[in-house]
Image (spheres, rainbow, N blue to C red):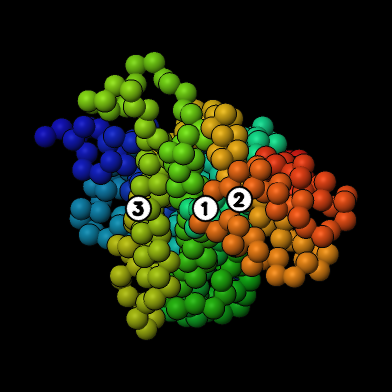
Amino acid sequence: MTTSSLTALSPLDGRYQRHTQSLATLFSESGLIHHRLRVEIEWLIQLASEPKIVELKPFSDAAIQRLRALDINFDADAAARIKAIESTTNHDVKAVEYYLREQLLADDELAPASEFIHFACTSEDINNLSHALMLKAGRDQILLPLLTQIQRALAELAADHAPVAMLARTHGQPASPTTMGKELANTVARLRRQHAQLAEIEILGKFNGAVGNFNAHVCAYPEIDWPQLSADFISGLGLTINSHTTQIEPHDYMAELFDTQCRINTILIDLCRDIWSYISLGYFRQRVVAGEVGSSTMPHKVNPIDFENAEGNLGIANALLEHLARKLPISRLQRDLTDSTVIRSVGSALGYVMIAGPALLKGLGKLEINAPALAADLDTNLEVLAEAVQTVMRRYNVPEPYEKLKALTRGQRINRADLDAFINDLEIPAEAKQRLLALTPDGYTGLAEHLTAQITDQP
């Protein structure tokens, strides 16, 4: 059977392929092979620039260009050739080494350097840097820009709805009013904090041989400062060195990155559920899209499918990311192979984030505030003003303010006449009494607008 978007086993490569294609370029098997080739090429160039390695002549600028062209021009044919070599070697990293040797042997100037390919390296020297480069690109070029888009969309909604009073619902019950803008601004503030943490995580790499001690390096060239050369090489790739490791880089930074992404996903799940609830309460309408069907049998329905889609896919992403964060930092003794197969699912974990993000953005773009519904809810819940009344009573030392308001309001609706009569009987200053008599639920939002502006006014 020919594989297509309709026959793909995973929805990442099938139904949702349009959302995950950018990740596939990085995290597919071809993407991993490409990054391995890049690391091998750059290490060879680094070695050739070391004057103490007299057996390896420095490369001309043209030769370096030709080497880097193998990286820049990497394509499906190159990946297929490397996989063909792997069918013989049964070793994926060795196949990259042999492919690069083929290319050098066909170049008169570079051919003498062929035995310095993969010099003093263990496979994990190549692999860990490849995964680090993939994760850095995935974070910086895909995840962070997507998160920025979501934050901006939410900040715009928050600014638009900053003054729109809304009945809060702590424990699902009517509570002191807020504004729709303030509730959305809360999520923006949470996301910005996690955004900063995600962006600041150091992406680490190691390049120190079979057990992390530069054993072979020192044996071959004891006069070279290998830790410094390794550090220079890793920083040249845009990564941060992890100088103390076993055969593998221990993946603690990956756990940090995945845990942070999990927190971002959890915040977005929380948002999806809240927006879903606001739609259910009638606080938001959803713009009707021509041609769309809400229900196969109920023609009237406009379901909150975008938020449901986002919530579901964020949940799958977290399940995978949490496993990756818990498993990858654990390796028996100096190395076992359990990380090798697990780490291949990083692209899948992030793929579900890439499905969820556009769905959430689409949903946010279809929201329309239903101001009459919010106003009606506030008008029929005057009892939420009990907090204000009893707090003013406390200021003026009225005995048992909480208990008196509890008797008046708990578990029951009150009307304006009931509340006004209660206020008029209070022994408090006339100015305070008039302020309470003039208070309405839609005007009892505290500093909600000001707090919203503190978030939405930021760039």
**Quadrant in the rendering for residue 160:** top right
Quadrant location of the C terminus in the rendered image: top right
Q: Earlier in the sequence, mark 3 or mark 1?
A: 3
**Quadrant in the rendering for residue 228:** bottom right
Circle 3: element type: helix
How packed mark 3 is, by other alpha carbons closer than 10 Å (few <14, some 14-19, many 20 or more), is some
The answer for how far apart the CA atoms under marks 2 and 3 are is 41 Å
Q: Earlier in the sequence, mark 2 or mark 1?
A: 2
User: Viewer-proximal residue, 31 or 39?
Assistant: 31
How packed mark 2 is, by other alpha carbons closer than 10 Å (few <14, some 14-19, many 20 or more), is many
- Residue type pointed to by label 1: Gln
Mark carried by residue 62: none
Q: Is residue 453 above or below residue 256?
A: above
Circle 2: element type: helix
Query: Could you say where residue 162 lies in the image, as x and y percent from the top left?
Result: 69, 38
The answer for how far apart the CA atoms under marks 3 and 1 are is 42 Å
Quadrant location of the N terminus in the rendered image: top left
Residue bearing mark 2 = 383
Q: Can residue 170 be seen at all in this image of the molecule?
A: yes
Q: Give the side of residue 310 with respect to residue 256, left or right.
A: left
- Tag 3–tag 1 contact (CB < 8 Å): no
Q: Give the side of residue 333 with respect to residue 262, left or right.
A: left
- Residue type pointed to by label 2: Glu
- Residue type pointed to by label 3: Ile
- Tag 2–tag 1 contact (CB < 8 Å): yes
Q: Give the side of residue 250 with respect to residue 2, left or right.
A: right
Query: Could you say where residue 312 lies in the image, as x and y percent from the top left?
Result: 36, 47
Mark carried by residue 316: 3
Mark carried by residue 412: 1
